[in-house]
Image (tube, grey):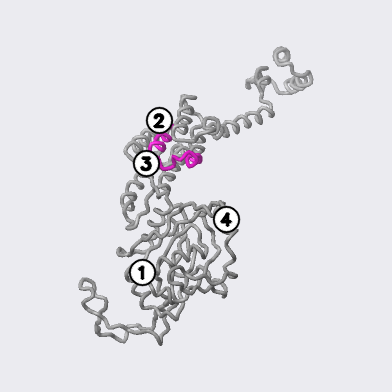
């Protein structure tokens, strides 16, 4: 019994010398050892847990975690600053590729490549490379190769490296939004990065299936690069609206600068109109006692460009003045214009539904101009009188809305407002040549909610 107690005291003294524990703890340990039974002490092996002083010294301080988080946040924001630093003055495709090369050569492990790719996708419209397939392939090349490829079916089933796969899908989705079809180089890069069964590869397969089907589905495609000349874009827009191969486009006035007698320069707008032979027929049959209306502007979107056009129309013909012309069966032999079919009907046939036929009146001509004031549209009506002499007899009313004019510059709008009176207070202006009567409408302006 005494020998066991002596051994316990020696061990406690040895521990006190190593770890520097207070004497109170060792006294309690000695009391517990002395009070225990000898049989229990003989059968049990005492274990002591040693704590090293190096562990206590290297314990992290809470303030260091905040410093690490700040460094990590700064590294995420640094990718946006990289584009601004390397492309301060000129933002072109060459500078965008230079930023990608600087990032890939900076670190062989491509740390932070996901954040860099997201930042590059946002900056692509600023550099004008959002429709360039080579830039998208170079952006996919930023991913490390053969790192995110799943090795077995379990990794493939549990979405191996989901953050990187989501970033790759985002690159392909932006290509889809801009109508860019991938090529074989895109497929090779995706196989090297994510494997043949990853989500980006499935997205690529869907694009390659649907894009060729929808590529030529529009029978009236709009070119990617619209003409910059306002006369050319007006000619293209009017031809698109008319939908008549026999319609003739006429340029009544080209944009030019004229000098007045006082020496002031006045910029005259362009006036481009269109009219088909069928519209000329309808205008020739129009009752000269009934007025014709010049209405607009009405918007037309061509991709991201908005242009405005004006129409010359008339009210619907009253029922008492309508004259039904006899149907000519030989007018069109390929496609019959009228079918007289006497089909046997049963009591189960339901004939209660009715389709309302709304007559909005004929449209005689259309035009486009950069200044939609009455003086400019008077020149258009004067040009129409050469082929439509009835316009010199019918009164003309203007229903012009003060809508947005994106094709008109600031200087042009100021000059037009300076010499243009309010439409409601304008007097009558005779047309050149025929001296036709022009009446300004005094009733409230009509909205643009008409059928186009």
Residue 198 in the figure: left or right of residue 44:
left
In the rendering, at what x and y percent does residue 445 appear?
55, 71
Name the residue tied to disc 3: 201
In the rendering, at what x and y percent does residue 184 appear?
31, 38
The quarter holding residue 319 reads: bottom left
Name the residue tied to disc 4: 415
Name the residue tied to disc 1: 387
Could you tell me if the residues under marks 2 and 3 are in contact, i.e. CB atoms within 8 Å? no
Magenta residues?
A: 121-142
Name the residue at 35% across, 84% down.
323
- Badge 1 or badge 2: first in the primary sequence: 2
Q: Is residue 152 a member of the stretch shown in magenta? A: no
For label 3, count other residues whose C-alpha is less than 10 Å away and answer few (under 14), some (14-19) or many (20+).
Answer: many
Secondary structure under tag 3 reads helix
Secondary structure under tag 1 reads loop
Residue 209 in the figure: left or right of residue 48:
left
The quarter holding residue 355 reads: bottom left
Name the residue at 65% across, 29% down.
65
Secondary structure under tag 4 reads helix
Quadrant of the image containing the N terminus: top right
Q: CA distance from mark 4 to mark 1?
A: 32 Å
């Amino acid at each position: 019994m005494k020998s066991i107690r002596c051994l316990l005291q020696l061990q406690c003294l040895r521990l006190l010398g190593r770890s520097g524990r207070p004497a109170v703890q060792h006294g309690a340990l000695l009391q517990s050892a002395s009070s225990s039974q000898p049989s229990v002490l003989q059968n049990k092996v005492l274990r002591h847990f040693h704590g090293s002083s190096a562990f206590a010294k290297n314990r992290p301080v809470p303030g260091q975690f905040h410093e690490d988080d700040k460094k990590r946040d700064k590294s995420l924001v640094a990718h946006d600053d990289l584009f601004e630093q390397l492309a301060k003055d000129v933002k072109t495709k060459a500078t965008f590729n230079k930023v990608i090369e600087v990032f890939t050569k900076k670190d062989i492990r491509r740390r932070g490549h996901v954040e860099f790719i997201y930042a590059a996708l946002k900056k692509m419209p600023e550099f004008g490379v959002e429709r360039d397939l080579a830039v998208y392939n170079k952006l996919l090349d930023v991913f490390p190769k053969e790192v995110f490829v799943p090795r077995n079916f379990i990794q493939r089933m549990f979405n191996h490296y989901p953050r990187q796969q989501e970033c790759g899908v985002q690159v392909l989705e932006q290509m889809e939004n801009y109508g860019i079809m991938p090529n074989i180089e895109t497929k090779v890069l995706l196989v090297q990065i994510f494997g043949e069964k990853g989500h980006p590869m499935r997205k690529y397969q869907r694009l390659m299936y649907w894009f060729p089907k929808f590529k030529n589905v529009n029978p009236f495609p709009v070119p990617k690069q619209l003409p910059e000349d306002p006369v050319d874009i007006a000619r293209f827009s009017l031809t698109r609206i008319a939908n008549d191969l026999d319609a003739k486009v006429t340029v009544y006035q080209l944009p030019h600068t004229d000098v007045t007698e006082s020496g002031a320069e006045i910029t005259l707008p362009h006036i481009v109109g269109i009219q088909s032979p069928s519209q000329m027929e309808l205008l020739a049959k129009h009752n000269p006692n009934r007025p014709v209306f010049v209405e607009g502007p009405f918007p037309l979107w061509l991709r991201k460009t908005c242009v405005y056009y004006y129409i010359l129309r008339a009210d619907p013909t009253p029922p008492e003045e309508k004259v039904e012309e006899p149907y000519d069966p030989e007018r069109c032999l390929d496609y019959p214009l009228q079918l007289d079919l006497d089909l046997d009907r049963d009591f189960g046939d339901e004939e209660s539904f009715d389709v309302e036929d709304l007559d909005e009146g004929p449209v005689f001509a259309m035009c486009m101009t950069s200044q939609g004031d009455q003086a400019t549209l008077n020149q258009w009506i004067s040009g129409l009188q050469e082929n439509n002499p009835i316009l010199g007899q019918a009164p003309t009313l203007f229903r012009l809305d003060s809508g947005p004019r994106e094709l008109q510059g600031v200087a042009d709008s100021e000059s037009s407002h300076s010499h243009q009176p309010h439409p409601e207070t304008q007097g009558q202006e005779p047309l050149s040549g025929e001296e036709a009567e022009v009446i300004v409408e005094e009733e409230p302006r009509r909205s643009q909610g008409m059928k186009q």
